Image: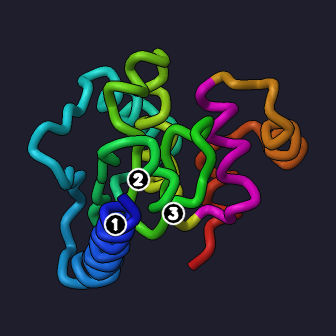
Amino acid sequence: MERLLKDQHMSTICTMKILLLLVLLIPLLSNSSEIIPLNDNFEFPYQVWEELNFFLNEASLTLPPTPVFIYESRNLYDFHILTGKPYDIGGIYSDFFIILQPIHILKRKGIYEKVLLHELLHWVLYGLDEKFQEGLIYWWLRDYERTEVDFFLSNFNGNLPKFIISHWNN
């Protein structure tokens, strides 16, 4: 049993190293604006695409030139190992890479589309000062109870494109 756990741990570490290599290498080699799933069963809901395009229009943004890679964890344990995050976090975005909990779990919780859109908004807002990203995203998704929203709104001038431009890091 101990040997099996050790083999699984080594396999997870190897997978993490390969994913890290992909995260570092592929964006450097590509100039396309794409969403690239890393598994064949990935479902991209039409509603998420529509919401993302609506946000882009309202914020006067376009898709980033660097593609985003989406990885669905095999199980919650792998999600935790890959991200270091607890199970109440549905997904994470970092450097043009999204790691999601298993989609069937997110769907069962009724949050798959919301989590996917949240992480895609991080991708779109990659250059926005990080201290404003969470607040803006929660505000956009109408999750107003978050303290990050209060911080964002205390700095928001009412003009989304102007706010983004004035807080964009080059």
Disc 2/disc 3 C-alpha distance (Å): 25 Å
Residue found at x 28% / y 59%:
69
| Residue 142 vertical placement versus 81 (above, below) | above
Q: Is residue 3 visible?
A: yes
Amino acid identity at mark 3: Tyr
Dot 1 or dot 3: first in sequence order is 1
Verify whether residue 129 appears in magenta.
yes
Marks 1/2 in contact by CB < 8 Å: the verdict is yes
Q: Residues within 10 Å of mark 3 (few under 14, many from 20)?
A: some
Disc 1/disc 2 C-alpha distance (Å): 7 Å
Q: Which mark is residue 127?
A: none
The residue closer to the viewer here, 80 or 58, is 80
Q: Which residue is mark 2?
A: 78
Amino acid identity at mark 1: Thr
Q: Residues within 10 Å of mark 2 (few under 14, many from 20)?
A: some
Residue found at x 28% / y 69%:
11
Q: Which residue is mark 3?
A: 126
Segment colored magenta: 128-141
Dot 3: what SS?
Answer: loop
Dot 2: what SS?
Answer: helix
Disc 1/disc 3 C-alpha distance (Å): 27 Å
| Residue 32 vertical placement versus 59 (above, below) | below
Q: Which residue is mark 1?
A: 12
Amino acid identity at mark 2: Asp
